[in-house]
Amino acid sequence: MKRKLTEKKLKQLYRLLSVRMTDFDCGKDCAPQNHGVPYCCDRKKVTPVLFKDEYHWHREQGDFWRKMPVETKSDRKLVEESCSYNVFAVCPGVESCRRTARSLACRLFPFEPFLDSRGYVSGLVYQNGDNGSCSLVGKPQQMYNQIYIKNAIRVWQELVDTFPEDKDLYIRESRKHTRHATRRNKPVCLFTYIK
């Protein structure tokens, strides 16, 4: 089967996301409130989803990433309902983290793209779901490296253009963000590149 994310493309996306998101280690900020483990690295709370091509690329380089063991009914349901191009995976954990081996999901967390109705990524928003324990959620845009924001928007555009199912998903999620903000009579908290 032909790869949608080639090694060349993956290297380009990883290079774009090698820029620091903030000027501090956010994991050190939230770990004390989560039994010493950063929220996004806690296997009980967050399971990274890698693109199959990304997963195979990592496996060609070593065994840092492994498929998530399916141990419960909810694990099985998660795997069965996911897109065919995704792999739920686990790494050795925070104590053995190799920053250069972090997945796209790790590098993009806690953001997801905000798309207009045509599928254009107009900015980033905090992911929907139970991310309240992430110390970054709710922080103002000024706290983030603007080059990271610009690069993450570019990466998300590449990904949603490559995977139309994700484009459709994030258009729907963006509408949910808009409806939620409208109900609260507030604008969507949208992160865009500021020069």
Image (cartoon, rainbow, N blue to C red):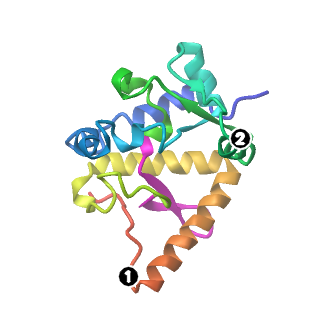
Q: Secondary structure at mark 1?
A: loop
Q: Quadrant of residue 167?
A: bottom right
Q: Is residue 24 magenta?
A: no
Indicate the position of residue 17 as horizontal and vertical percent values: 40, 38
**The N terminus lies in quadrant:** top right
Residue 174, placed above or below residue 47: below
Mark 1 = which residue?
A: 186
Circle 1: residue type:
Lys
Magenta span covers which residues? 107-126
Q: Are marks 2 and 1 in contact (CB under 8 Å)?
A: no
Mark 2 vs mark 1: give the one in front: 2
| Residue at which label 2 appears | 76
Write the residue at 48% across / 33% down.
103
Q: Is residue 124 magenta?
A: yes
Crowding at label 1, few (<14), some or many (≥20) Cα neighbours within 10 Å?
few
Disc 2 marks a residue whose amino acid type is: Arg
Residue at image position (53%, 79%) is 179
C-alpha separation, residue under disc 2 versus residue under disc 1? 38 Å
Q: Nearer the viewer, residue 93 or 11?
A: 93
At numbered mark 2, what does the secondary structure look like: helix, strand or loop? Answer: helix
**Disc on the earlier residue, 2 or 1:** 2
Residue 59 x, y percent position in the rendering: 59, 18
Say if 11 sits above or below 59 in the image. Answer: below
